[in-house]
Amino acid sequence: MQAVVALLALQLGWGVFLFPAAFAKLGWATCLASIAVLAALTCYSGFLFARLFQMTPGAVIFGDIGERAAGSFGRTIVYVVVYTMAASRTIILHQAAAESLSYIFPREQMPTPWHSGAAVLVVMAALVQVRKMSDLSWVFLCGTASQFVAICIVVYELLSFPDRDPVYKAQAVTWDTLLPSVVAFFNVVFAFGGQSAFVEIMSSMTQPSDFPGAVTASTVLITVLYVTIGLVGYRSHGASAASVILFELGHSPRVRFANCCILLQAASQYLANLNLWTHNLLVLLARRHSKGAAAAAAARSSIHSDSDDSDDTSSQQQQGPAGSGSHGAGNVVGKAAGKVTGKVVVSGKAGTGLRALNTPQHQTASTRVGGSASAKAGKSFQSIAGAITSAKAERDSSPSVPVGGGGGGGGAGGQASLHTTPKADSRAAHTPSQWFGISLFVLSYSYVVSSGFPYFSSLVSLFTSSTFLVCAYVLPAWFSLRLLGKRMSWQERLLLRALIPACLALSVVGLYGSIQSLIRDIARHPMWGSATWSDVRLYEAHVYGVEDDDKLP
């Protein structure tokens, strides 16, 4: 049950309000078929990830499975895809929060995307300075609860106040033009995301074998919800349903309260992703700096040991115990200095050198406390949202910054000793100024992109087509073929081999269609002026051909 709640908090977001437009752009039969296929693939991905997790003992992040299946190349591919998703998700969530804020105001008082986006930036810049996710669990609880309140209000408004052309008839298939259909399809794909965090959730469960059932249960629930919202919205608005259905329901007090609810939900998701992405960027920068410093130390120690070769043997033996005081890193890194790349550093005599251990087993040991805390916190819905997100943040950056210098290395008599850095990548390892600077950088690019290109559907489609299908289906299929091999039936292997090129082809088509749609949006109605979010929605409706010119601002 805890995993189901965590998955619902992860998957259920703004995507639910895009389904009426998806039904209008694809047709009810095409959209239902797309939902059914994606729901089945999502359930299957739960089983696939569970088997991959079982084949990778000690895995705590998706990158561990990638490394087990394809070495450092596999881990790198996973990191590139996951970090690209993290960078783009903050843009989408900044726009969601800014647009929700704008629709709280009456039509004549609505702020521009730049003004509402700036307000979101200021508030988030203050809230994200609270680094511990557990301290923000109440925000995540309120955000998810408010989402269900907003959904209930939307369903009531759609059923009570339909706004549909009386002569319009529901269409089973409406692929009249490519661009709106491609955007609508990838909006549906976006709503079934979340696979990038599957491994993190499993590693925090006491019974990871229950994960496939949890994915199936959550997928069934969100599928029923998506179909309900989509069909009700399509029946109520017909072909005029464009983009986010909530923003087409007017400005009544009920609707404005619903906008307050999804503002809270969007802000809570934005805060969690902002905290995660800030932490990961700081870790990446620290690791890069540490590797450079370690390489310089290794070079210096190598020169040191070369000069020691000219001394006699007795002189070298005298330097062994005292080397840490006179030579610093010289006692840690010997003549055959090793790499400094992991968490656990083994140091001993000068001749034994240095090696780093960066195995999933060591990573599991370093995150065991977080996993245990996440499991305990899962006793309440409030704690799950914060614990899962916090665990993901800590594990996505598992290889910690290595210890530099000699310090107390070597040990008496040159015996090997372990030096661990269990908190080197924790949020406490970053100074307040570093955290503020990087978080402000993330907020700034998210603000500029989301305010300069306030086309939610096109942006969602663009980011989804470039990363989601690859992360959710292509990489798991590839890793399964390498790790599971003949443990799978030939039918399943055939399915995975067909799934990889199919998803890649869809991604290419979606990326092309999304870019063209975004270019068309910018050419038709550039938003660098003083237009409001309501103006954006009217322009989008005009682009889709469902509004009259005299209704445009």
Image (tube, rainbow, N blue to C red):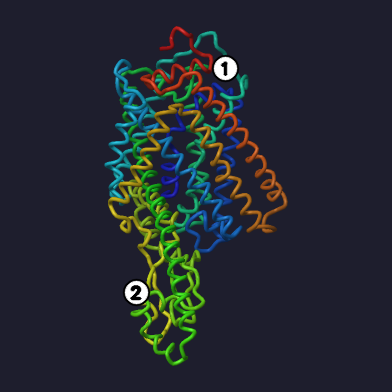
Q: Secondary structure at mark 2?
A: loop
Residue 410: x, y in percent?
Answer: 39, 80
Q: Residue furthest bottom?
A: 314
Q: Indicate whether 524 appears above or below 19.
A: above
Residue 163: x, y in percent?
Answer: 45, 14
Kind of residue at badge 1: Ala
Q: Nearer the viewer, residue 36 or 24?
A: 24
At 38% across and 52% down in the image, what residue appears?
Answer: 282
What residue would you read off at disc 1?
Answer: 170
Kind of residue at badge 2: Gly
Residue 514: x, y in percent?
Answer: 55, 30
Q: Nearer the viewer, residue 478 or 98?
A: 98
* Left or right, 546 with reference to 420: right
**Upstream in the sequence, badge 2 or badge 1?**
1
On-image quarter of the C terminus: top left
The crowd level at tag 1 (other Cα within 10 Å; few <14, some 14-19, many 20+) is some
Residue 293: x, y in percent?
Answer: 42, 64
Q: Nearer the viewer, residue 302 or 552?
A: 302
Q: Indicate whether 487 appears above or below 420.
A: above
Q: Secondary structure at mark 1?
A: loop
At 40% across and 15% down in the image, what residue appears?
Answer: 161
What residue would you read off at disc 2?
Answer: 407
